[in-house]
Image (cartoon, rainbow, N blue to C red):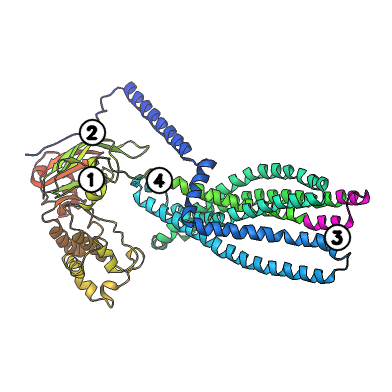
Amino acid sequence: MAAQKGNTVNTANASGARVDAEQQDQEQKQQEQKQERQKQKQEQTPRPPHLFKRFIQYYKPHKKLFALDMLAALFIAAIGMVYPVVTNRMLNDLIPERKYRAVVVAGIIVLTLYLIRMLLRYFVQYYGHMIGVGMQEQMRSDLFAHLQKLPFRFFDDHETGKIMSRLTSDLFDVSELAHHGPENLFISGIMIIGSFVYLSTINIVLTLIIFVCAPILAVVAGICRKKMRDAFAERRKTTAMINASIESSVTGIRVTKAFNNAEAEQAKFEDSNSQFREACRKSYRAMAIFHSSTSFITDAFNVVILIAGGLFLYGGKITFGDYSTFIVSVNLFISPITTLIGFMEQYQNGVTGFARFLEIMDVPPEADDPEAIDLETVRGEIRFDHVSFRYEGNSDVLNDVSFSVARGQKLALVGPSGGGKTTICHLIPAFYELTEGTISIDGVDIRKLKKASLRDAVGIVQQDVFLFGGTIRDNILYGRPGATEEEMIEAAKRARIHDFVAGLEHGYDSEIGERGVKLSGGQKQRISIARVFLKNPAILILDEATSALDTTTEILIQDALDELCQGRTTIVVAHRLSTVKTADEIAVVSGGSIIERGTHAELMALENGIYKELYTLQFRGN
């Protein structure tokens, strides 16, 4: 007999005061959730020591090559100290004493050392960059692997183009920092310390005068660095926005052309582009202030040396040879300072990119219960027990839903759009965590099952078929990559697609284009069905699998689906009620609740039933 069930929240007779109170409670709850998310986000924001520690870990696989790179950098810095030392010796000894042979020998030695430095620089440039590339590769691999483990909620909230920017441009800047960061800091540190020691041997007072000016440079650089950091972070965000805009527009180009909305798409892109331009303006302004200010201070060092050295020479506190050497050698100090100044831009880019990398890496992945078990020998019995579900920050999508599907039976879900039918389908393979209630497979709570084994038992055919770029073979074998050629062809035959594929010039090796653009809707749908045939799951979900097809194609595909359903527990979501008349049970889902249940005949026998009304309206023309 028909079972009519009303699970909607009864608020029709509630008093106005109670409604207001419930609304206030809901708003307060949503505000608390928002504050909690902000708190979690703040906690996840990597602090410098934490960021540095995690960054260093990526050097471990390259530690031997990195050590050689730093050793080469040490020799480069040491050779850089040779020229002023030789200059001082020539001016104070060799030239005054007319030791011309020694002058030539010294010149040859310096030239030989510069040749060695050339080879060392080649090593540092090539292998140093390869260290950065290797680290970038590992980070990208880690990030991609982590993305595969993230829950559906993450992808609901993040655009594809923005995720792509984390995988590409952000990590490129991180790799540049990985190479140039240690090298610049190491060489510059050695040069600054070495120059202080060497210049002190010439004239300690004049040396101290120069080094006293260094704190001024540090203060200016520190003030400007914060503005650069904020500006570069903003530029990163706008770059991601442009990537997202391009990805969306290119993917939907056919829709754009069909509706002749190129101007609207251009306007949306220009909005993102102008935001990027403004962010670049701010970042380059901050960078210009930084470089011009620090360059002025380093230029001032030369003026200080010129004046102070001239006074020292006039007072007889330094010889002309030492003064000339000091003028030449002061670049030993100014050059690494200039290098560090130029490095700040690269540092900001790399640190910002790594922080954005960690933002995703710190998102908790899907995790199995510690005591989760594998789903073995699947019978396919499904039970929903008082299930409620809401998306983050939204009201309930499902409210106290209960039903069961016996092994091998077919349950059809019908009703108005937005009622919760697709959400029910997404909860069975645990794409989302339940808000309340329990879903069980063969009597076991799905939260106690390993997600991999649960999803192995479930096959899904959707209205919006997604095919990967590549060949027909690649996409069918996606159902079971280790399947044999004979098994793949058998699956294609059962999906009614083999004859079409056999008629193609390259057969199963035919390229289908991005998302299968070279195929018709029916051909794509049959490939997706062949994929599920190959997977051979115990539980089958058909989510509007034929609603977008013409009648002739639908009949052809429906035959394949009927065969696919045989012996499997099946849940069918459909708007065309003619396709669900033979279901073992039909459930009408509306407003997040099941309001009617029964067979086609039982539901049609109900007076003023929702299903009967929908069926009558759909077939009123007949």
Determine which residue is flagged by label 2.
Answer: 8
First in residue order: circle 2 vs circle 1 = 2
Which residue: 26% across, 58% down?
A: 548
Q: Is residue 353 magenta?
A: no
First in residue order: circle 4 vs circle 1 = 4
| Relative horizontal placement of residue 96, taking residue 231 as reference (left or right) | right
**In which quarter of the view is residue 622 placed?**
bottom left
In the rendered image, residue 78, in percent from the top left (x then y), is placed at: 68, 58
- Marks 3 and 1, how far apart in space? 87 Å
The amino acid type of the residue labelled 3 equals Asn
Q: Which residues are magenta?
A: 308-329
- Marks 2 and 4, how far apart in space? 28 Å
Q: Is 232 in front, or is 112?
A: 112
| Relative horizontal placement of residue 183, taking residue 385 as reference (left or right) | right
Q: Residues within 10 Å of mark 3 (few under 14, many from 20)?
A: some
Determine which residue is flagged by label 3.
Answer: 92
- Marks 4 and 1, how far apart in space? 21 Å
Discs 2/4, front = 4
**In which quarter of the view is residue 437 placed?**
top left
**In which quarter of the view is residue 384 placed?**
top left
Which residue: 62% across, 58% down?
A: 73
The amino acid type of the residue labelled 2 equals Thr
Tag 3 secondary structure: helix
Q: Residues within 10 Å of mark 4 (few under 14, many from 20)?
A: few
Determine which residue is flagged by label 4.
Answer: 157
In the rendered image, residue 100, in percent from the top left (x then y), is placed at: 84, 71
Determine which residue is flagged by label 1.
Answer: 428
Q: Is 266 in front, or is 79?
A: 79
What is the residue that sits farthest to the left in this orientation?
A: 1
First in residue order: circle 2 vs circle 4 = 2
First in residue order: circle 4 vs circle 3 = 3
